[in-house]
Amino acid sequence: MVKQKEEMQQAVRKKQKMTPSEAIVETLVAENVKEVYGIVGSAFMDMLDLFPTAGIRFVPVRHEQSAGHMADAKERVSGTAGVIVGQNGPGITNMVTSVAAANQAHSPMVVISPSAGTPSIGLDGFQEADQVSIFEDITKETVRVTHTNRVADCLRTAFRIAYAERGPVLFDIPRDLFYGETEDYILQPNQYRADKRGSGDPASIEKAVELLKNAKNPAIISGRGSVDADGVDSVVKIAEHLSAPAACAYMHNDAFPADHPLAVGPIGYMGSKAAMYSLQEADVVLAIGTRLSQFGTLPCYDIDYFPKNAKIIQVDINPRQIGRTHPVEVGIIGDAKAASDEIYRLLQSELPSPEKDEKRLQTIAKRKEDWEQELVDLAMVDGNPINPRRALLEMTKAMPENAIVSSDIGNVSSTANAYLKFNQTRRHIAALTFGNTGFAYPAALGAQLAEPDAPVFAIVGDGAWGMSLHEVSTAVEQNIPVVACVFNNQAWAAEKKNQVDYYDDRYVGSDIKGPEFAEVAKSMGALAYSIDKPEDIVPAIKDALKQRKPTVLNIYVDGTQLAPPFRKDALKMPTRMLDKYKHLDYSVWGK
């Protein structure tokens, strides 16, 4: 063991002869990469051949978009950057949507992007595309390999930027540069990147503490940065010290423990009214590890809850996000945990033994109780065949404490925001503000690979399921026991709700018919159930968890019980000017 360690240290100190493929794979090993997601292609076959010996698992998906979503979720659960690869041209361009989603989700990722060989670049050859230009706007950086001697160095640069700027980086390598000979170091990550960030400017921390100390109604918003930094416990300490209600940022319901007396739930579309009312009355808001996204702070339930006059303290690791959507009183550029720890330390000094604000605690408890009752009452309204809220309620009853849940985009998936509660971090994997359908199921597969023993669920509408059901084959082939809960209302229901409210129930493109998804899943080798009674949901989930097999629940829900439109801010009642279309004008049919 000692000899092996000495040999490794010597190898680090001197250059070694190796092939470019070996340099890439050894750098992946140094970065603790255990899986790479993609579809096999001739462009990177020389590298792929080394994976089994190197201890890297290649996970072959059915569509390259799924590879990006799997890698995104794997990083969110494990904290290790995801890695994807595909054939040059169409394989890489198929990844555009999932890489763009990871970029907006701030998920470190490296896209190994084989491109046309150097002798044929620019000749519009077979499977050639200018991949660097395509990905420039949806990645943190595009890194081009220009010579075999730069392969390892460029890959190190890709990982350094992915972690530093929290997002995907394109590592573009002409396909002929996998071959040949190079001399280079295989460095350890601590030799070329630093992961630790400080707590931020001390003067800004002091100003933030002064605001919090004197606040009458402080409130906290905790986001993904708190989760990524393992700083949620530190946020809890601040909340307890101030008796401050703590909300979760939009679709980050694991950013504050739901069972804590000060937890008020998530903000944003279909979030918690308890959180919204608590924020509405705040005079100081401490936003930790969140960019306070524009969509995630829009009014909901006709509650314009985000305070206009409150003094905002925003902590974010990325200076670009400070004050981007809401003006701040104090901006702190720093690690969410380090900043929270320093704020708490100074609070203890400035406000040593604050009395618990019993009146505020009672208000929080009452708001939570009222909201929980409203959620149950809404769920218990009869549906034909099942009220989608009832299905969500039953599903949450069956989920174990350590369950990981991915959620897609869509009417039912977004309604789940109100019902999903977590007491542990890295449990909620949502599609977030890029808003692409087809995210949840491949993301759940990636999450399951990150935590093989955890129960993992995907919440998917039938529209989004049509974009991802092919990955059931991947789940069966790779033995990934995710439980997919498909909420089947035979519609693109979010869009249908717009047509109900704004277009006089004129349905164009929103009604869809699909196959019997349970039968399709069975044909792929999965465990499957077709459900049209709410009382069958819990037993089906318990059976799936017991058998630990890839499972699909095709849950038929009422297509008329729809949540409010996603984008009230972006929709207007229709006006028509040409005589041909006058009968479609709101002024005619809206009377």
Image: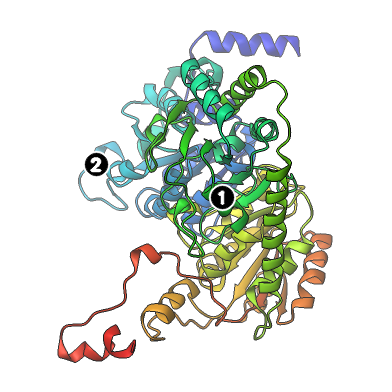
In percent of width and height, residue 403 lies at 73, 52
Disc 2 marks a residue whose amino acid type is Ile
Q: Which of 572 and 507 is in front in this view?
A: 572
Callout 1 secondary element:
helix
Q: Can residue 371 be seen in this view?
A: yes
Give the residue at mark 2.
121
Of the two numbered discs 1 and 2 in the rendering, the one whose residue sits closer to the viewer: 1
Q: Is residue 479 visible?
A: no
Q: In which quarter of the image is residue 326?
A: top left
Q: In this view, does 76 lie above or below 338?
A: below
In percent of width and height, residue 460 lies at 58, 66
Q: Which of marks 1 and 2 is nearer the N terminus?
A: 1
In percent of width and height, residue 126 lies at 29, 53
Left or right: 389 in relation to 22: right
* Residue at 71% over, 48% down: 258
* Residue at 65% over, 71% down: 389
Question: How far apart are the two marked residues, 1 and 2, measured between alpha carbons?
Answer: 31 Å
Give the residue at mark 1.
70
Q: Quadrant of residue 225?
A: top right
* Residue at 74% over, 81% down: 533
Q: In this view, does 65 lie above or below 345?
A: below
Disc 1 marks a residue whose amino acid type is Met
* Residue at 44% over, 28% down: 330
Q: In this view, does 399 lie above or below 292?
A: below
- How crowded pointer 1 is (Cα within 10 Å; few <14, some 14-19, many 20+) is rated as many
Callout 2 secondary element:
loop
In percent of width and height, residue 182 lies at 42, 21
